[in-house]
Amino acid sequence: MSGRARLALCATVATLCAAGALLPLVDPVSWMFQAAALLALMTGAGALTRRVPLARPLTIGVQVLVAVVLLTFLFAPGEAILGLVPGPDAVEEFGRLLRDGVQDVGRYAIPAPVTPGIRLLLVAGVLVIGLIVDAVAVTYRSAAPAGLPLLALYSVAAGLSQGGAGWLWFLVAAAGYLLLLLAEGRDRLSQWGRVFGATAGPGRPDGQGLPFGDAGPAPAPVRTGRRIGALALGIALVVPAALPSLGSGLLARTGGGPGPGGGGGTISAVNPVVSLQDSLNQPVDKEVLNYRTTAADTRDLYLRIVALDHFDGASWKPSERTVTDVPERLPEPAGLSATVDRARINTSISTAGWYAQNWLPLPYPASRVDISGRWRYEPQGRTLVGDRGQNTRGLQYQVESLQVRPTPRQLSAAPAPPEDLLREYTEVPDSLPGIVRSTARQVTHGAPTAYAKAVKLQDWFALYGGFTYNTDVRAGSGAQAIARFLTDKQGFCVHFSFSMAAMARTLGIPARVAVGFTPGTKQPDGTTSVSLRDAHAWPELYFQGIGWTRFEPTPSRGSIPDYAYQDTSGQPDHAGRPAPAPSRARTPSDGPTAAPSCGPGERRSDSGTTCTALPAASGARPSDDGTSPWAVAALALAALLVLLLPAVPLLWRLRTRSRRMAQAGVDGEGDGAAATLAAWRELLDTAWDFGILPDDALTPRNAAARIIRIGELQPEAAAAAHRVAAAVEQVLYAPQPRPATGLALDVQRVRAGLAAAATRGIRLRAGLAPRSAARLRWACSARWTSLLLRFRTSRPVASVRRATTALRPGRQRA
């Protein structure tokens, strides 16, 4: 294999190693086989064009053309010309797939399903990175800068998984890059002639020597390069972990909680909104946790994870708070008066083995938590957060909590909250659009108390405001996100809770947003199951004497609490509208607490409880992955060829041995010069497979003696080697050679003797990766050189060259 071909192969391997960091992001990983097959074909096209040779930009252009054709064949064969050439319809199909892929990336949680759009993004992304790496490292012969696109590929994977790419994938990507650097260094050294430290190549006419692996120890520059690479990799791994300032580096734990310590520390602000929308849009619903409780009615048993209390006009997120050790009994909820009715309940919760996050789901407000592990307590939000990598995977814990049951009269009569709490939780930024404040005042016009205003806001969103529940709407960010929602009136729980909390703050009502799960679905065994689609967000408003109080503005989700119904006594409200009918059943329901999320190709009905199929668009294609059976067959064949490629030397060696042994006569009857020489070549190559390099400078007698000495052959095998050598000398030097028999059996005896004296590693190498297969590489190289020479000296090519030369400036006749 030539230096450039070896470098191209290493560039492909390095790209695939870096692309391995994308594997944890999606499921299944079948896309990787498609990407590997297409990348191998594109790299092969580049290797062929460099052989011609073409100019460097033309080589890259050919590779781009091959990549486009392959992507068209895989993703848009029905719209392409002859299934390969992209036309306008194929370009339109690619645009649609790219748009769908971008939407799917934002919709699904990790691991995401491999939709057609995501598959196109993954495969095309690997091809683009592979093309850049091949162009930089092979076409322009500069492997070091090729690490930048490889780093970009790994960084994208690590960023999307929020650091979940892990140290193993970093090591794989780094190993691929080091392999590329070593291949380039070896290629540069070979351009200076024979590499010092290597011996002359046995049995090879050009005398260029054997590869490093076949010529004993690696040369000093290569050993030095390996040591430098290993040292650099070690520094990259150890230094970020050792220095406190780089503690969140490449190998830092993901999703870490508060810092270690006894009674202090802080938790950093995180934003769970994206993961909430991902959970609601999962194509397959999965159980997150299940619980058993002593509560007679679970409609109000929301499992709260975290409270988002900081509002900057663009987003809600938790403030940075001080955390402490989890106390034996949690303090009484802030602002809760002894006159408010309450009941103590106990809940036993078990989380799924796949569900791993830092915040612990708890009924609110919890009074006592019996749990093992490293957990910390944040008093303001009354939440538990994992410390030093602690998460919720596969937990079992007990929670004692309160079911607070205030009355509308108590909420209406609530006094003003403390000044510091009022100042903190009614703060809104100046960038908040004016429509938020004006709409809040319009909706609550005439409401005499903060409680009445809160109920009016809730009912406007949930009942008569004209809003539609839709999980496909992006959560949005920026100061205009709430304004757009109030205008478009489409969204999911994040939009409703964020907007109601912001509007409540403009009215002087302390508000924040809670994220967690609705109560779930009762099971026949008495437990309650909470799934991904029970993920929810709701506003909490503060009333002095009651504390933080849940409201439910999201239509068709959760349940409106009993205290959140206005006591209108059938009278019209201040806006002239009759009081809306209650949206909550007065008897417990065993059905799901949330309407299911609609899948691709469906939309929610007007009631918000069912999903119906969207009407098919004119000329729309079926919602499949766009891959024809022919494409699958071609990719399977390409993948099979890629897998069989490493076995080619072994298969060639087995075929060569079988042919030589048949020529020498396995039954001991073979004779003649051809049979003797075939047996001798097989003996030399057999010894080569076991690490004894042939030496063409030795006579057959001396060569056999060398094999016997190095291979430590026993007398029977040594005698067999001497007989084969004597037969060769008879053929080469005797005027009338004596016929020789049993040479094939003698070669088999020598092979058995070498195997008996060799270690297990040498025997495996001789059987699976025979060194003598280097002759195949030499033969292919010689044949390719011969074909190129024949092509260049052929009559048509010579005529074209003469015509081109005649047209060059300075050679035209006057």
Image (cartoon, rainbow, N blue to C red):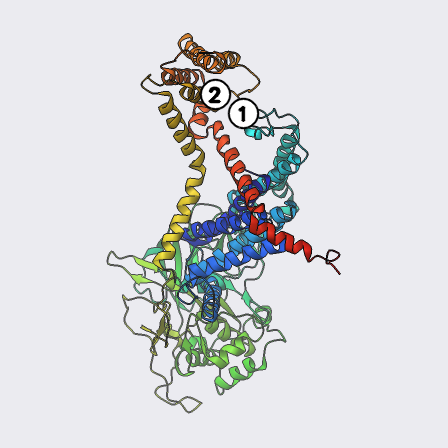
Q: Residues within 10 Å of mark 2 (few under 14, many from 20)?
A: many
Per the rendering, the mark at residue 23 is none
Q: Is 178 on the left-hand or right-hand side of 662? A: right
Q: Position of residue 688 (x, y in %)?
A: 49, 23
The residue drawn where x is 39% and y is 53% is: 634
The residue pinned by badge 2 equals 684
Q: Mark 1: which secondary structure? A: loop
Q: Is residue 204 above or below residue 610?
A: above
Who is closer to the viewer here, 347 or 271? 271
Q: Are marks 1 and 2 in contact (CB under 8 Å)?
A: yes
Which of marks 2 and 1 precedes in the sequence? 1
Q: Quadrant of the N terminus?
A: top right
**Residue 333 in view in this figure:** no
Q: Is residue 307 above or below residue 582?
A: above
Q: Is 441 on the left-hand or right-hand side of 609? A: right
Q: Mark 2: which secondary structure? A: helix
The residue pinned by badge 1 equals 203
